[in-house]
Amino acid sequence: MPSAIRLRGVVKRFGELTAVDGLDLDVPAGSCVGLLGPNGAGKSTTMKALTAQVIADQGELEVLGYRLPEDSKQARAQMGVVPQLDNLDVSLTVEQNLLVFAHLYRVPAGERKAAIGRALTMANLGDRRRSKVDQLSGGMRRRLLIARALLHEPRLVLLDEPTVGLDPQVRQELWALIDRLRSEGVSILMSTHYIEEAERLCDNVTIMSHGKAVAVGPPSELIAEHAGAEAIEVYGAPTRLIEVEGIARARGWRTRRTGTSVSILHANGDTQLEGERRVTNLEDVFVLLTGEEIA
Amino acid sequence: MAATVAQRRLGRLERAALQGVMVREVVNYSSFWRSSTFSSTVDPTVYLLAFGFGFGSLVSTVAGYDYINFVGTGIVATTVLFSGAFPAMYSTFVKYEFQHTYDAILAAPVDTEELVTAEALWIAARTGTYGCVPMLVAAVFGLDLSLGMLLVPAIAALAGCGWACFGIFIAARAKGIESFSYWQSGLLTPMFLVAGTFFPLGELPTWAQVAGNLNPLFHCVELVRHAVFAFAGWYDVGHVAFLVGFALVSWRLAIRFMERKLIL
């Protein structure tokens, strides 16, 4: 399958700090890939490199078959970007915001009206077209950001933390929207630190830590490989938890703290320790591999 | 439609990109044109009236001109500064720092060079228009009308283009909005006063005259005055050349420093 995005050995340094440190990343055409990682793992720098707003110090970057940074403009003409920070023009209406970007994305004059109508329908904002952006709720603004990225029917969409800071029901609305895009064959790269989001939407995930990819694969395979099928969740006083961790370590099982409990992984539930059995998830993998709790 | 874009290699300074950035400016302008027009034209008009009545009551002619003719033409340069450099500085800074507008624009098929050029051209178009307002006010108070006034929008737009780029350059170098004070008090205010707008440079010490000749506003003042009353041959070619040079240098500086700021 041809790649929508292909990165090899990408390095980006900011002075002393190496934000991206030899990253390989693939987004096969038509698939949805999640870029996971704790804060500071290099996700945002990677996303910016894909639009040539960050220029890599080393490595190869290819987006939609174009080499970056030299042919980035061509790639940008065929991709839509949903930024993490809301950068809508707040004193303009919903429709005016879309009109401006229909121009910036070079939608031909005769097709602009239809493109705006289609984007409004897709984002379910048809009845708010004349509302000013500063009158919209947070969820509507995020939907407008997505609509803005879809005006020119891009082949690739980059979503940078698309649901951060939103209510659970609004988040689910956005998931439905992203899932619809995916079903239409658009390639998607989504950075997120909501594990559930990646687990539900992504065909593949790349887990980043300290600027590198530490695990790549479909969520189910990563879970099976790194966390096993079932986990035992042992609750107790802090001293008991330390004791449980010692027992697990002695038997070669991996553990992770989840605040008030210890999760014992990779034992497939057979620990002979008193605890609650539960299905393992991508969060277990994430914490094991990055050594960090998520927000 | 994406396929048609892909077929050819996209170049530098493309019309579609310039137009896209300008459409954004024009649509936004429709929501704040009142305040912008007010500040860009009322400030210079106040200076015009204050100097016209205040100074004008003390002197009748300056450098061979009736004072109203002298200050009524010179004031165009003040308007160019107020409606060119200042909006460029503040709007660039706000769009970069608070609205993150440039992130969105540069994610589209637009380069920094196109972004800066389109924004500067749009501001230049505004200075071309605003530049004439205080001059027309002066006409009410006795500034002689002439055909040469028809050239003033073009002169104001040329000078405005340079100042818009210079304003973008200042904003690109600014770490915080407070650093604008250094540029404003240290450079722009002295330039605004020593431009031959309100009093001729001829009476000043030699060093100030030399400094005045390096001031783009002085060349704008002279050119407007000569366009309205009588051209001065090669001198005016020199003034045009200076303004073109100023615009070109500021344009490249603005692009260079905006790239440093926007592309990491």
Image (cartoon, coloured by chain):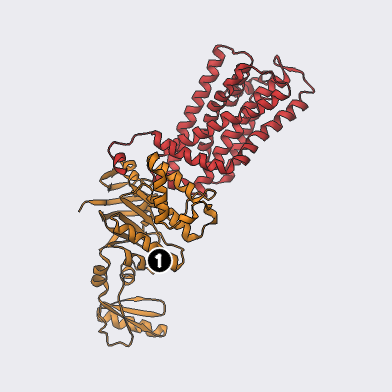
In which quarter of the view is residue A278 placed?
A: bottom left
Q: Residues within 10 Å of mark 1 (few under 14, many from 20)?
A: some
Q: Secondary structure at mark 1?
A: helix
Please tell me which residue lies in front, B222 or B154.
B154
Left or right of B239, for residue A294: left
- Which residue corresponds to the image point at 69% horizontal and 18% vertical from the top-left? B144
Closest to the observer: B149 or A40? Answer: B149
Quarter of the image with the N terminus of chain A is bottom left
Q: Is residue B28 left or right of residue A26?
A: right
Q: Residue furthest top?
A: B233
Q: Position of residue A203 (x, y in %)?
A: 27, 62
Q: Is residue B174 visible?
A: no
Q: Colour of chain A?
A: orange
Measured from the top left, where is residue A164 in percent x and y?
43, 62
Of the 4 image quadrants, the one containing the C terminus of chain A is: bottom left
Q: Is residue A231 above or below residue B201?
A: below
> Is residue A22 among what the camera can see?
yes
Residue A295 lies, with reference to residue A43, above or below; the image says below
The residue depicted at 41 percent of the width and 55 percent of the height is: A121
A9 or A227: nearer the viewer: A227
Q: Chain of mark 1?
A: A
Q: Residue at x 76, y 25 (%)?
A: B55
Residue B111 picture location, percent across and down: 40, 39
In front of the other: A76 or B255: A76
Label 1 belongs to which residue? A172
Q: Position of residue B180 (x, y in %)?
A: 58, 41
Seen in the picture, residue B57 relative to A145 is either above or below; the reply is above
Left or right of A56? Residue A95 is: right
Amino acid type of the residue tagged 1 in the rendering:
Gln
Q: Which hue is chain B drawn in?
A: red
Q: Residue furthest left?
A: A1
Q: Quadrant of residue B13?
A: top left
